[in-house]
Image: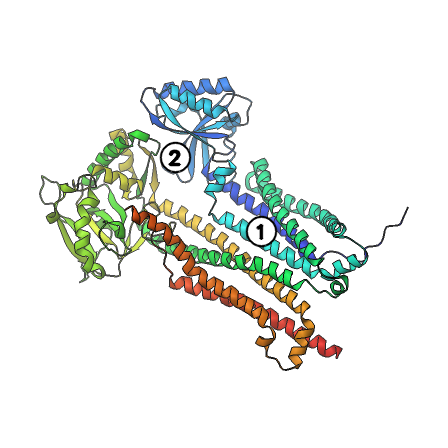
Amino acid sequence: MRPERPDLGGGMHRGIKFVHAAVLAFSAMLAFLFVRGLDEDWVLGHSAVVWVSESRNSASGEQVTRAIESFAAEHGVTVARELPDLRDPDRRRHLYLVAGDPGSDTASWLTKGYPAFGRDYHTDVHPFVEIGQRDPRGFYYVFGPSRADDALLATFAGLGLHGQVSHPLSVLDLTSVYSDSALLWAFLVVALAAVTLTGASVLLGAKVYGVLRLQGESFAQILRRDLRQLGLFWVIAAGVVTAAALIFLGLYNGLTWLGLYAVVAAGMAGLLILVVLAAHAAVLALAFKVEVPQALKGELPARSAAFCAYLVRAPALLLTLGVITAVVLAGQDVLARQNSRDAYARAGDATAILLNGSLGRESGEMEVRVGQWLRKADAEGQIIVAGRRKLQNLGPSTDLPQREMLIVNDTFLGEQPILDPEGRRYTRAPREGKARGAGPVRLIVPDSLARHASAIAAEIPSLLSPRDPKRIHPGEVKTLWAKSAQRVFGYNSGSESGGSGSNPGEDRSLVRDPVLVVVPNGSTYLADNTYTAFATQGGVVFPDPDDVLGGIAANKLQTYVRALRPVGQNAALELRTSVNDFRMRLFNFAVAVAVLLVSGVGVCIVYSRKNAQAIFVKHISGWRFAATHRSVLAGEALLAALLVAWLPFNAWQQNQELKWYAERGIPAPRNAVQITTLDLVLTAALIVIELGAVLLALAVFHRRIVKEGATEA
């Protein structure tokens, strides 16, 4: 037997092993965040969701319950209906369940409870019969074979109930939901970082690969050698990460949904590992383009390597710009939510309501009945109205600025201080005209918008009563003035009502210089459907939660009002979500900057190794630093120019979409994109980071080359 030839090449660069270990750890962390989010949005383990949205009122609640129990027993599946908790819908839900197979895992939830993955959301499980005579429209989970969902939909159709089937946990639906989430951005940024670090590490091992080639090793043999070395390390790293994850999950949730977590973590790790191995093989093949003598000196294929580096560097630069913008906006949102905490604290137990979104054709009846109840509650002083509208979308012919309008009642003025130009506070107006049940509509316009007052006043009738604007005579609108630079508390973040901000998730609880339309309590100026529309946006608030419960019971609105949502609690939950989002985006930014730095250093390594002798000669010949390295500096200047040009191009591209709406007379879904001072500052900062890293690396390598050249001389 021929003795095995010793491996004189040495081990692979430790950076490659670091990448694989980091990828495994990151996949474990990201999988935890992903599954925890799924658990809060949906009941885990289901195969489909049937959304019943239409009812002919031909079946009672008892008939629906019997039909579902019979269906579950016949098909051997579990069916469950989810309902939010009436008092705490953001942190608790109720699951009414019937199991066709008593031995199934889901059947055990009735005795052991739902196995929640996270700690922040609680699910109470009840037998299906306890659901009572509730309206059957809503969401039903199916746990079992995929074909059972269509059969359940057919069963509902036989009862006069119609809806549709969805699969929220399918890859297609999850891709759509998470297409612009911080988690996806984190995955993409880490993938780019892994590719960059792997490529740099392989290039830094050029001398080792040169020795192996001198020994007669082929590309395939060297690649197999690297994979063998990685195999042992990978087993150890995977074991360490798995053990750490098991210990953490055991303490966190008792290893609940471990199988789902493992599948998600393994899938993410598998994708990233494949990307890393592909980058490893590609850069190794690139190293083979250098002749063996040059490879033994550590030289690299300059043109190809530089091209690959910039192929990563250019998208990384644009990605970093998007990430840093998201970080700044998320940070501003966190600060805004923190600044509004005192206002929510003063609101005390004030609560908004959640309305049923599964009523289909009967939503018109809900608008009338709920609107009538809210009007009566308004007349009795039980509610605060704080509806929102975009000022610039008020009318088709008005040229109004990007501000917000608050449609409020007199009770709002009693709770929130609104000052006139002389500093006097507006108060609740006395009742006038009992036949109308109201006095005039007061339009309070900030001084800064005085020139737009007449245009705004002309649109008030259509704003308050879109279906019957003639119910309000222009003479019943009284224009008043407000002191500029006021911040008004709107009782909600404004995220559900659109608003004037460019960021749909930003907090606008404190509205700066809004236009206020003050409607007397309980007046007929506001249509029933307008009251209901404001309620769906969180714009109707009950200072006393007991008034909500009493009103629901007295008016038999259990079908329409799903839950109460305390405004302070909702704000606290949104703040927590905002902080978590900010942290994730900050992590993305740190990784993206690391990619820029590593790719910049990689360019300098390739350049300096290829041109070391020429750099030394130019230095002793008196060439300036910029002239010596003009090729690299020119490439970086081109990247900077690309970044600068990207701003107007991106704004133009997004604004082109708005022309389609304008040509058809449709209100635009968002404002036109404009280049702001923030955009310019962030772009300039990113250019400084990009050029600074390259200049610093060039200076270090230049000094090393000069020092080594002088020593050899």
Q: From the viewer's perspective, is residue 134 above or below residue 538?
A: above
x, y (%) of residue 708? 71, 75
Q: From the viewer's perspective, is residue 362 above or below residue 215?
A: above
| Residue holding disc 1 | 191
Front residue (pair 184, 88) = 184
* Direction from residue 397 to residue 6 in the image, left or right: right
Q: Residue furthest right?
A: 1
Front residue (pair 447, 205) = 205
Front residue (pair 664, 110) = 664
Kindly identify which numbered label has been placed on residue 535.
Answer: none
Amino acid type of disc 2? Asp
Where on the picture, by quarter, is residue 260? top right
Quadrant for the C terminus in the image = bottom right
Q: Residue at x 18, y 48 (%)?
A: 460
* Direction from residue 292 to residue 637 in the image, left or right: left
Q: From the viewer's perspective, is residue 213 above or below residue 371?
A: below
| Residue holding disc 2 | 85
Q: Secondary structure at mark 1?
A: helix
Whether residue 585 is visible: yes
Q: Secondary structure at mark 2?
A: loop
Could you tell me how far apart the alpha carbons at marks 1 and 2 are, in whole angstroms? 40 Å
Say whether disc 1 or disc 2 marks the residue closer to the N-terminus.
2
Q: From the viewer's perspective, is residue 692 above or below residue 545?
A: below
Amino acid type of disc 1? Ala
Front residue (pair 422, 655) = 655
Q: Residues within 10 Å of mark 2 (few under 14, many from 20)?
A: many
x, y (%) of residue 611? 67, 70
